[in-house]
Image (tube, grey):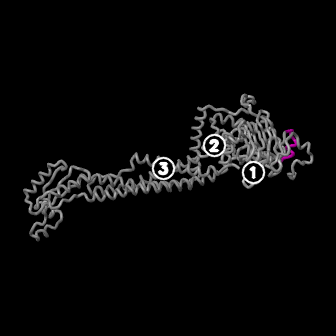
Amino acid sequence: MNQKATPVKNTAPKGATAARTTFKQRFESWREHHKEVALESLNRLLATPLPTVMTVLVIAIALSLPAGLYVMLKNAEAISDDWDGSAQISLFLHFKTSAEQGRKLADTLAQRGDVKRTEYISRQQALAEFEEQSGFGDLLQELGENPLPAVVVVYPSVTDLDAAEALRLDLAAQGEVDLAQLDAQWVQRLYAILDLGRRLVVALSIGLALAVLLVIINTIRLAIESRRDEIIIVKLVGGTDAFVRRPFMYTGLWYGLGGCLIALLLIQTLLWWLDGPVQALSELYRSQFELSGLGLEVTFLMLTGSILIGLVGARLAVSQHIRSIEPG
Amino acid sequence: MIHFHKVSKRYDNGKDALLNVSFELDQGELTFLTGHSGAGKSTLLKLIMLIERPSGGRMVICDQDVAKVGRSAIPYFRRQIGMVFQNHQLLFDRTVYDNVALPLIIAGYRPRETGRRVRAALDKVGLLDKEALNPIALSGGEQQRVGIARAVVNKPRILIADEPTGNLDPGLSAEIMDLFDQFSQVGVTVLIATHDLGLIARYDHRLLSLDSGRLISDGMDQIAADPHHQIYTGGY
């Protein structure tokens, strides 16, 4: 039996020679095989459209929730980025401050590096403005005395909120200043909400990615179960674990890809649906604001992420079951 | 080619399926394996296919000590062995061609080479004109021949058949046996497990008989020498 020196296959008639293939041939057929398996897996999914569509939709909805929230958040951030144009610090001066002192203060402050420009609003101007804008002019006439203080409006040249707040504190320390108010509190609140939103997106992404993973694992598990006989035959004729795994890996890939594409479509539909009202709202505020989508980077990230989830899910499902399905 | 040395198999439930079985099959030899149900035929075939592992003894198959074939090496080991199943084990969701091509696709052949070999194997079993059909459309004998084509398409060194003529009439059985004969003549070691005494009697081949897990006879033409069929009590 041990005829190592004269291998059996050389002495055997040609018909029984085990076939040899070169590495290049193997690689080519491996590639060809992958293409075939990928298409076959896709065809299998398309052959049962209803369950496939339902699974893909579940994945798509799960993916579009955090992605949709992300888009909303991103747009809200874009709004808040506009704040520096509108932010200003109002310095309400003491009543005893004279108009001259006020103007001087405004001029002095305008020299500062962190201040773009200043504007002095005298008590009379403030009153006139108030009368014009509020329509309560008559009421003020009744009061007899002008209740409004003079104001120095400071437009900071710094754009971030912390620096603006530091500037406000600095200006509040000026002798003439009664009260310094940063008119960007809404920005601060928005920032806090956005920060919360960002965390929510992360938490939601992790949770729903896990959900997608479980959906894929379960779907693939059922697919494996339905192809039990085939797996046994493949193993009997010499199929490796990788060979058995392959069609299911592609199934996972298709689910991930399909779910993500539908999710992107859902988000695009949502943006399109919201675009009209947002434009209207934006016009009311005389803003140039426009809704932006996910962006190329995040779209790419989402695609790779969901494909990866599909592959990992398939891998987990297969490795759980592949060993339990053995001929015998 | 197949070497059993005092091979035993005891299942987890304590049942001894094989006890101290020793035999040697050479290259190109055609051998019958017989015995009544539960005698250990299936276990013996499963051991050769590495579906089960022996609990004692030594097995050398295709110059490989089976004990040294790890789990990940099993697929490559099995590619040297073609197996024909009693229930054909065909896949009914694809054509005859795709069924026969399966071992070649698994082994990584190029499509052109696969096509050439599949057609050669189908030609050999006389089903070249049925390659595009679903095997479900074929008769039992034809399905069995598809199974044989699949078993030999990768030119294995060993061909194992489990009750290959189980559900076939004598005429078809003879055709199948002729095929096995031809394979053994080109150097394939053929082992046929069968209940079919008539079949065994018609051919002058070596016969291994199992009874309760023991090899009770190993020789040529046992049936002819034992007209009362005392070799086993299979109820025939």
Q: Secondary structure at mark 1?
A: strand
Figure quadrant of residue A243: top right
Residue carrying label 1: B10
Residue carrying label 3: A306
Looking at numbered disc 1 in the image, what kind of residue is underneath it? Arg
Q: Is residue A126 above or below residue B156?
A: below
Nearer-N-terminus badge (2/1): 1
Residue at 75% x, 54% y is B14
Residue at 47% x, 50% y is A260
Figure quadrant of residue A283: bottom left
Q: Assign the N terminus of chain A to one quadrant of the image.
A: top right
Count residues near mark 1 (Cα–Cα under 10 Å), then give few for <14, some for 14-19, many for 20+: some
Subunit of mark 2? Answer: B
Tags 3 and 2 both on a single chain: no
Subunit of mark 1? Answer: B
Q: Position of residue B64 (x, y in %)?
A: 71, 37
Count of numbered circles in the view? 3
Residue at mark 2 to residue at mark 1: CA–CA distance: 24 Å
Looking at numbered disc 2 in the image, what kind of residue is underneath it? Ser
Q: Is residue B232 left or right of residue B66?
A: right
Residue at 7% x, 59% y is A98
Count residues near mark 3 (Cα–Cα under 10 Å), then give few for <14, some for 14-19, many for 20+: many
Residue carrying label 2: B72
| Tags 3 and 2 touching, CB below 8 Å | no
Looking at numbered disc 3 in the image, what kind of residue is underneath it? Ser
Marks 3 and 2: which is nearer the front? 2
Q: Is residue B66 in view?
A: yes
Q: Is residue A302 left or right of residue B142?
A: left
Does the magenta segment cover residue B211? Answer: no
Question: What segment is highlighted magenta in the picture?
Answer: B195-205
Subunit of mark 3? Answer: A
Q: Position of residue A248 (x, y in %)?
A: 58, 48
